[in-house]
């Protein structure tokens, strides 16, 4: 029996065919093996006379006996599906037909062949039960022949293949650390997981010499910022002042350097102080009428400019002293300008004033104001401490600003571990932080009525940056600093943060981290051992942002595993700081998993779109779908902290086919009606054969829902693997729903 194998959609194409003198032409062709109707399209053109014509016809390809096999698009190991074969008699008489099915990597349950009697032009559907027994690719073949009657000897056969997946879900765990000093060693114990697939996953060792990834995009954003308000110009100045140190260590293309950088800073300083008010302060906009909001004194903008002035001078640039001193005196008496602000906003502005003044006191040109600034900061810190619960009512930013100021103007005396203000703030940091194996962050918001956010330009990412900066002053040995750095770097989009304030404070924190922890130029060798064998050696020389990765297969881990955990040792020889990540990825052998929360909670359930009877759930949690019905899939993703680069993936049972309503021809009648418009928490979705995926760059704490519609296409009993979610670049933060059983009848 000849097997049909050529299923090309295009039967033939002739670009230039000439007619004879009678205006006729012909072409020969061999039709592909598809049993279908072909469209014939002809376009005629006469040449110089520019006459043309178009005609269309069709050709139908058929056989006396035809078979059309149908299986789901894919299967999961353990699925029991109905393999459907449609047999059609195209003759004008009765035919006795024999049908046979065979397959590789698919177990046929029951009969593998049938004999049937077909009337003229009759078609019949046959079902063979198949069981998916092993992951991989399955190949099947169907053959039919007329043994008696009309068309005796006619036959047809068709091949096909179907992908079989393992319904297991991937899991991961990781630990992070850093090694300082020549000859530093880190010792870990690796306990290989039990009952996992040896062909999947393994140990990944990642090492790098810097946590500071490329910051060029943040500098470019501030340098090219188009608006020229005092706040924007001051932010540009801070970025350019910090840029000089970064350029000596890392490449920063497309940014001013050397004399060009000096000249631009001078131009921006001139532009900035032309916008200064007669009282020494700044408004939101330059030269605006005093009776308009934009022309009024803005305490926040004034403090931002004072902070900018102090940082620029600390980096060695020259500023006009008199305008800065005039601004400083205004800030020392700022309280009388805050009568119209709510209590929490007023306290935050006063704390920021102490912070900016403390930075100014570190500049040698302002020695005459140091004592005044110290008295002002000490008096305010004492007043806050005297309230008993003063810091609890402050936002995290305000508390950090005041703690920095108090520590700067009055450092701890010998024998005193930390100042009372510092001690309280460190407790607040420990209480409010949200921490994972790799990152740390704070989720904060101002709750006062009024316009606090518009006054303070607050954001959670700016809070992270401020805590990171100040914590390096208050407690430089705190292990949370590196995690805050990683969390802040993960919060970028397109290489930068959201606005001028976030970018400026993030760059300030990065600059401080660079000088405190990565001042030494890296020149070291990182070596790792597992049990008694060396698994990786990487050399780092000079400033670079690359990460070296070594993968140890799971099969090797299982081979060297003993009754006790295997020692895993990392050693650094040379100057610099080594950062490492030890990640373990694996897939459990069990096909039936319970829900699991390792940072995300995931829930999934099904219901009917049209008739409630289409989808039923029994006492054992097994769903039954009516064949051909529409099924709505509901997913809920929960997180208790801010997450970055999150994917939610629902692996489909083989009987469901998702509907993409963006495609022309797909009915939109099943879309939810009377549903109010709402902001989508995700940015991108993909509907694939075996899974549906949703992606979000930033995921805020709380519960997030997503739903889509499928068609129940194939009869049988199927496995719905767990729906999973993870941080794509920190896969040890993950979660899954439970495995479900699904039947289609």
Image (cartoon, grey):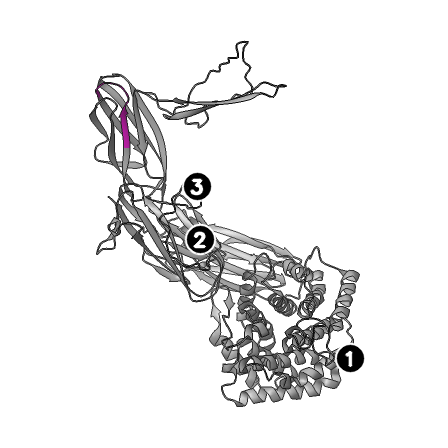
Could you say which quadrant of the image residue 265 lies in? bottom right
Question: Closer to the observer: label 3 or label 1?
Answer: 3
Which residue occupies the foreground of this view, 745 or 732?
745
Residue 617 picture location, percent across and down: 24, 53
Q: Is 438 in the magenta?
A: no
Residue 437 picture location, percent across and down: 47, 64
Q: Which mark is residue 322?
A: 1
Circle nearer the N terminus (1, 2)? 1
Q: Gap in Å between the C-alphas at discs 1 and 2?
A: 56 Å
Instruction: Tell me if mark 2 has few (under 14), some (14-19) or many (20+) residues whose alpha carbon lies within 10 angstroms of its own.
Output: some
Find numbered disc 2 in the image and state the secondary structure of the residue it sits on. Answer: strand
Residue annotated with mark 2 = 694
- Magenta residues span 85-95
Residue annotated with mark 3 = 664
In the rendered image, the quadrant that contains the C terminus is top left
Q: Gap in Å between the C-alphas at discs 3 and 2?
A: 22 Å
Is any atom of residue 558 visible in this view? Answer: yes
């Amino acid at each position: 029996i000849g097997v049909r194998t050529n299923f090309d959609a295009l039967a033939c194409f002739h670009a230039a065919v000439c007619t004879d003198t009678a205006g006729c032409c012909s072409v020969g062709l061999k039709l592909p093996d598809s049993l279908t109707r072909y469209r014939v399209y002809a376009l005629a053109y006469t040449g110089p006379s520019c006459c043309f014509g178009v005609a269309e016809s069709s050709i139908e390809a058929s056989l006396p006996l035809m078979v059309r096999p149908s299986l789901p698009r894919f299967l999961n190991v353990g699925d029991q599906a109905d393999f459907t074969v449609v047999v059609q008699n195209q003759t004008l008489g009765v035919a006795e037909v024999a049908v046979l099915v065979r397959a590789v990597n698919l177990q046929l349950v029951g009969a593998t062949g049938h004999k049937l009697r077909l009337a003229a032009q009759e078609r019949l559907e046959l079902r063979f039960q198949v069981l998916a027994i092993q992951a991989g690719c399955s190949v099947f073949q169907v053959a039919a022949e007329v043994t008696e009657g009309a068309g005796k000897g006619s036959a047809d056969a068709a091949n096909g293949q179907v992908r079989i997946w393992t319904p297991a879900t991937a899991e991961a765990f990781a630990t992070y650390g850093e090694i300082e000093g020549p000859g530093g060693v880190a010792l870990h114990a690796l306990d290989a997981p039990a009952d996992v697939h040896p062909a999947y996953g393994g140990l990944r060792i990642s090492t790098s010499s810097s946590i500071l990834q490329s910051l060029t995009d943040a500098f470019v954003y501030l340098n090219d910022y188009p608006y020229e308000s005092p706040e924007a110009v001051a932010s540009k100045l801070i970025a350019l002042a910090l840029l000089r140190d970064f350029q000596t260590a890392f490449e920063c293309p497309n940014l001013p350097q050397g004399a060009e950088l000096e000249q631009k800073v001078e131009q921006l300083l001139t532009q900035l102080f032309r916008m200064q008010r007669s009282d020494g302060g700044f408004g939101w906009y330059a030269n605006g009428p005093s009776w308009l909001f934009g022309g009024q004194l803005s305490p926040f903008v004034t403090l931002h400019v004072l902070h900018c002035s102090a940082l620029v001078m600390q980096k060695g640039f020259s500023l006009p002293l008199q305008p800065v001193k005039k601004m400083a005196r205004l800030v020392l008496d700022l309280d009388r300008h805050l009568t119209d602000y709510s209590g929490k906003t007023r306290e935050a502005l006063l704390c920021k004033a102490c912070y900016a003044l403390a930075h100014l006191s570190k500049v040698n040109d302002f020695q005459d104001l140091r004592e005044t600034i110290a008295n002002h900061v000490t008096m305010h810190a004492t007043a806050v401490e005297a309230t008993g619960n003063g810091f609890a009512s402050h936002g995290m930013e305000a508390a950090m600003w005041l703690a920095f100021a108090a520590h700067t103007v009055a450092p701890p005396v010998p024998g005193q571990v930390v100042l009372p203000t510092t001690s309280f703030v460190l407790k607040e940091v420990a209480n409010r932080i949200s921490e994972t194996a790799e990152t740390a962050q704070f989720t904060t918001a101002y709750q006062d009525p009024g316009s606090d956010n518009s006054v303070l330009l607050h954001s959670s990412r700016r809070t992270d940056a401020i805590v990171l900066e100040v914590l390096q002053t208050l407690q430089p040995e705190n292990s949370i600093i590196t995690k805050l750095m990683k969390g802040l770097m993960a919060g970028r989009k397109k290489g930068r943060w959201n606005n001028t304030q976030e970018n400026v404070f993030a760059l300030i924190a990065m600059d401080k981290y660079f000088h405190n922890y990565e001042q030494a130029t890296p020149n070291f060798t990182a070596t790792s051992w597992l049990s008694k064998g060396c698994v990786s050696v990487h050399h780092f020389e000079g400033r670079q942002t690359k990460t070296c990765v070594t993968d140890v297969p799971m099969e090797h881990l299982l081979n060297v595993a003993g009754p006790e955990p295997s020692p895993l040792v990392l050693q650094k020889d040379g100057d610099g700081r080594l950062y490492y990540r030890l990640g373990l990825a694996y897939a459990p052998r069990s096909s039936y998993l319970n829900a699991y929360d390792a940072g995300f909670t995931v829930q999934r359930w099904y219901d009917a779109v049209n008739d409630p009877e289409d989808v039923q759930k029994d006492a054992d949690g097994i769903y039954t779908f009516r064949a051909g019905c529409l099924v709505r899939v509901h997913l809920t993703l929960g997180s208790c902290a801010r997450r970055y680069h999150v994917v939610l993936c629902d692996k489909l049972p083989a009987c469901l086919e998702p509907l993409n309503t963006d495609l022309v021809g797909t009915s939109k009648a099943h879309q939810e009606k009377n549903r109010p418009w709402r902001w989508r928490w995700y940015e991108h979705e993909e509907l694939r054969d075996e899974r549906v995926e949703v992606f979000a760059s930033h995921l805020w704490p709380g519960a997030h829902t997503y739903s889509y519609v499928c068609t129940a296409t194939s009869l049988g009993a199927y496995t719905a693997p767990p729906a999973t979610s993870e941080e794509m670049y920190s896969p040890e933060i993950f979660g899954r729903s439970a495995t479900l059983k699904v039947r289609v009848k």
